[in-house]
Amino acid sequence: MSKKEAYTVQEWMDYIEGRVRGDQAIQMERILLTEPDAMDEYLEALGMAREYPALPNLDDFTDSVMNRIDAMASKGKARNSRGGRSRRWFEHRAFHYTVAACLTLIFLSSGLFDKVAPYHKFQEGNTAGSFTEKWTEAATSWLDNFKPKP
C-alpha cells in the first residue's frame, strides 16, 4: 500500500461514522477492496465503533420488544380474502399450483404420458397432421381402451 493510500484508524472511524466526503469515501472503499492492510485497519476501527450505550433497564427493554413482536404477529394473522372471510390453507392458489406440479412429476416419473401418447406417433418422419392432432388421436385411442366392448 502506498503512502498516499494509507489511512489511520481514526480516518477509518470517520468513514464508519459518515464524516468523510463522498469522493474520499469512494476512494476508501476502493482501497478496502484491493489492500489487505487497509482491511485490517478498517476492522480494528470497526471494533472500536462497537461501543454501545448500556441499557438502563434490560427487562423493560426485552418486554417492549416482545410486545411489539406479538402485535406484529397478530396483525399478520388477520388477513382476509377478497370476500371478507379468511381463507383456509387449501384454498390458496399456491396450494393448487403445488398439487398440480406434484401430480405432473408423478405422471412423468411413472411413464403415464408415454402410455397416453406412444413414442412412434411423434417421430419426426411421421409428418401427417399437426402435433395437436397427434395428441388428440393418442388420447382418444387410450380412452377407447376403457370403453366396454359390445
Image (cartoon, helix red, strand yellow):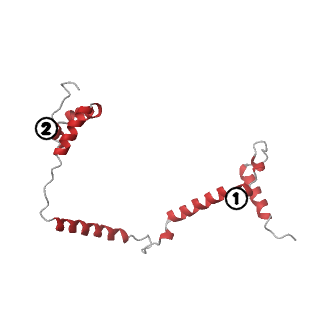
Residue under numbered circle 1? 112
Q: Is residue 114 left or right of residue 45?
A: right
What residue appears at the point 51 percent right and 70 percent down from the top-left corner? 90
What residue appears at the point 35 percent right and 68 percent down from the top-left corner? 76
The local crowd at label 1, few if under 14, some if 14 to 19, many if 20 or more residues have their Cα within 10 Å, is: few
Q: Is residue 2 above or below residue 40?
A: above
What residue appears at the point 57 percent right and 59 percent down from the top-left corner? 101
What residue appears at the point 30 percent right and 67 percent down from the top-left corner? 72
Q: Secondary structure at mark 2?
A: helix
Compare residues 97 and 61 and report the one nearer the observer: 61
Quarter the N terminus occupies: top left
Q: Position of residue 23 (x, y in %)?
A: 21, 33
Residue under numbered circle 2? 10
Compare residues 22 and 61 and report the one nearer the observer: 61
Q: Is residue 113 above or below residue 124?
A: below
Q: Are marks 2 and 1 in contact (CB under 8 Å)?
A: no
Snapshot quadrant of residue 106: bottom right
Q: How many angstroms separate mark 2 from mark 1 (CA)?
A: 70 Å
Q: What amino acid is at disc 2?
A: Gln
